[in-house]
């Protein structure tokens, strides 16, 4: 009985893989019809003044109580010199589901505060613009790169029917970034292109009455395109991407180096969590002593020692 189930499953999967291959071949053959939605972007030789922002977050448990910590890191380059700025938040009463949203909002809030002290040309965010608070208050372009695409927001913004139908058909067997990759690599093969490529921008949403444009960027050939959101003057999108190209040529990465740097610095690792616990223990004073006494009386000491 079990063997029959396994055999049937293998046969079914083999059939589906064959169907997938046939559809992929058709999509690959049709990709040349959509190269008009791809444009080349040459790198800018002018230096760009930027701020890159990212955050790390976690929950730290001590004596059975939870405290949420958020580490916001900003890399500012306004005069040819990079400055790392850090903002640390410790919060009570924040659930795990709320923590990521609060971290994204704090990134924008702290970046907005710091940007008033530096003459920058663009703010770089890790993660989408849509869904954040405070971002609409920036008076410079905001460019957000989304490595992990959780929704097909670009598809939802496409207004060209033929292009939308093709992407919809391709989504039956592959993810959105891979679809764009197929089109871009077809473009490169046909046009011998070695510069950065981007797809046609479409309005994918609004933040406080300001339009947000979505598109895909491939800074390096053969790398998976990155879904990108932009808020600012739409006529300047290519110019902003052009300025990002010299910062996005790390081998095998194809991603803005400033965002890569702040991502690494912002991570809340085990060492930082240990420091937070140590601070809670050493600076808690009478409050924690009172809690210890309560636990002993209630027979909860063994429980909290393991937390």
Image (tube, helix red, strand yellow):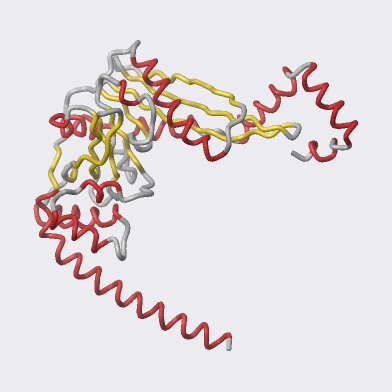
Q: Residue extending furthest top?
A: 117
Q: How many marks?
A: 0
- Residue at image coords 16%, 48%: 159
Q: Position of residue 29 (x, y in %)?
A: 15, 67
In the foreground, 217 or 97: 97
Q: Name the image quarter holding the C terminus.
A: top right
Residue 93 position by quadrant: top right
- Residue at image coords 49%, 36%: 100
In the foreground, 249 or 201: 201
Residue 109 position by quadrant: top left
Is any part of residue 189 visible from this angle? no
The answer to whether residue 202 is left or right of residue 264 is: left
Residue 39 drawn above or below residue 293? below
- Residue at image coords 35%, 75%: 17
Q: Position of residue 62 (x, y in %)?
A: 72, 32
Residue 6 drawn above or below residue 124? below
Q: Position of residue 173 (x, y in %)?
A: 31, 65
Is any part of residue 65 visible from this angle? yes
Q: Name the image quarter holding the N terminus.
A: bottom right
Residue 289 drawn above or below residue 221? above
Residue 84 position by quadrant: top left
Q: Position of residue 179 (x, y in %)?
A: 25, 57
The answer to whether residue 81 is left or right of residue 40 is: right
């Amino acid at each position: 009985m079990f063997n029959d189930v396994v055999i049937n499953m293998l046969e079914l999967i083999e059939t589906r893989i064959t169907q997938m291959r046939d559809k992929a071949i058709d999509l690959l053959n049709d990709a040349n019809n959509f190269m008009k939605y791809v444009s080349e972007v040459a790198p800018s030789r002018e230096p760009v003044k930027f701020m890159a922002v990212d955050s790390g977050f976690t929950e730290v448990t001590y004596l059975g109580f939870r405290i949420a910590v958020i580490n916001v890191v900003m890399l500012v380059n306004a005069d040819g010199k990079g400055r790392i700025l850090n903002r640390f938040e410790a919060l009570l009463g924040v659930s795990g589901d709320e923590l990521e949203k609060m971290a994204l909002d704090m990134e924008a809030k702290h970046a907005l505060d710091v940007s008033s002290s530096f003459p920058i040309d663009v703010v770089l965010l890790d993660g989408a613009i849509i869904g954040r608070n405070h971002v609409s208050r920036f008076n410079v372009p905001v460019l957000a790169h989304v490595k992990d695409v959780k929704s097909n927001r670009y598809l939802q913004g496409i207004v060209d029917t033929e292009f939308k139908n093709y992407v919809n058909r391709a989504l039956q067997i592959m993810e959105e970034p891979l679809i764009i990759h197929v089109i871009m690599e077809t473009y490169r093969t046909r046009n011998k292109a070695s510069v950065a490529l981007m797809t046609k921008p479409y309005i994918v949403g609004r933040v406080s009455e300001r339009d947000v444009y979505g598109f895909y960027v491939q800074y390096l050939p053969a790398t998976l395109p990155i879904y990108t959101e932009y808020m600012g003057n739409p006529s300047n999108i290519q110019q902003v991407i052009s300025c990002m190209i010299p910062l996005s040529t790390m081998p095998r990465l194809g991603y803005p180096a400033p965002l890569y740097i702040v991502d690494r610095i912002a991570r809340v690792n085990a060492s930082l969590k240990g420091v937070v616990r140590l601070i809670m223990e050493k600076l808690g004073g009478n409050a924690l002593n009172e809690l210890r006494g309560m636990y002993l009386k209630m027979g909860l000491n063994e429980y909290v020692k393991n937390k």
